[in-house]
């Protein structure tokens, strides 16, 4: 049985220290209107959260959800930032512990890829469910920001195209 393509971004599965996965609250600039989905990598820009690029060392974590006041003055809780113009008081939750291990769909992966660093491919998420479409691009190593720690077990996952893998950030914006 082969894997099915179905990107969902990065989701926390465990912590290298044995600790639980946690989020930290950050702010997003009121003028920022680019959508950010649960599972997208994020970075800081002038102290505010925004979506991260495919490659690089600037990611500080993975977007976990947000709270904001919409243009009608209503408080909204959401697993993704819609990009709504006129929204204010944006509070963003981020899985930002450098020791967090995430599960992510790869373009293709085999046991030989374990221990190797790769970049992400960040694409627009799915607004109907609020999830990222980010995948680990096992062909791209420009920034090599994430390293595969193992091939995920279970649910029919197997080596090859669209294999789910566990990764850890090897270049992290908050790590020394």
Image: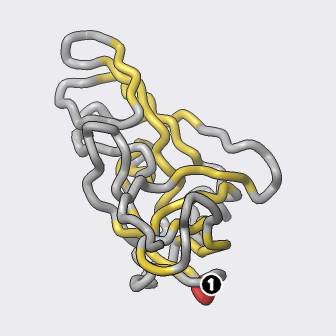
Q: Quadrant of the C terminus?
A: bottom right
**Disc 1 packing (10 Å; few <14; some 14–19; many ≥20):** some
Identity of the residue drawn at 64% across and 52% down? 13
Front residue (pair 95, 31): 95
> What residue occupies the far right of the structure in this picture?
18
52 to the left or right of 152: left
160 to the left or right of 36: right
144 to the left or right of 87: right
> What residue occupies the far front of the structure in this picture?
1
Front residue (pair 155, 92): 155
Answer above or below: position of 52 versus 39: below
Image location (x, y in percent) of residue 87: 25, 24
The image quadrant of residue 174 is bottom right
Answer above or below: position of 91 versus 147: above
Front residue (pair 27, 46): 27
> What residue occupies the far top of the structure in this picture?
73
Identity of the residue drawn at 76% across and 59% down? 16
Count of labels shown?
1
Identity of the residue drawn at 57% across and 70% down? 171
The answer to whether one can see residue 50 in this image is: yes
Answer above or below: position of 151 versus 49: below
Secondary element at image label 1: helix
> What residue occupies the far bottom of the structure in this picture?
112
The image quadrant of residue 27 is top left
Image location (x, y in percent) of residue 133: 34, 56
Identity of the residue drawn at 42% across and 71% down? 162
Residue where numbered disc 1 is placed: 111
């Amino acid at each position: 049985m082969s894997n099915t393509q179905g990107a969902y971004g990065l989701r926390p599965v465990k912590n290298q220290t044995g600790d639980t996965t946690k989020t930290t609250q950050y702010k997003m600039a009121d003028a920022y209107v680019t959508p950010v989905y649960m599972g997208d990598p994020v970075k800081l820009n002038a102290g505010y959260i925004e979506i991260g690029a495919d490659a690089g060392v600037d990611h500080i974590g993975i977007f976990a959800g947000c709270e904001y006041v919409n243009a009608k003055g209503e408080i909204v809780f959401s697993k993704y930032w819609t990009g709504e113009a006129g929204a204010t008081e944006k509070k963003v939750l981020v899985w930002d512990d450098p020791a967090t291990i995430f599960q992510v769909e790869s373009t293709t992966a085999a046991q030989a890829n374990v221990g190797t660093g790769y970049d992400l491919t960040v694409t627009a998420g799915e607004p109907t469910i609020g999830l990222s479409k980010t995948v680990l691009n096992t062909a791209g190593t420009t920034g090599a920001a994430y390293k595969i720690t193992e091939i995920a077990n279970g649910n029919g996952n197997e080596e090859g195209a669209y294999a789910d893998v566990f990764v850890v950030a090897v270049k992290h914006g908050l790590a020394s």
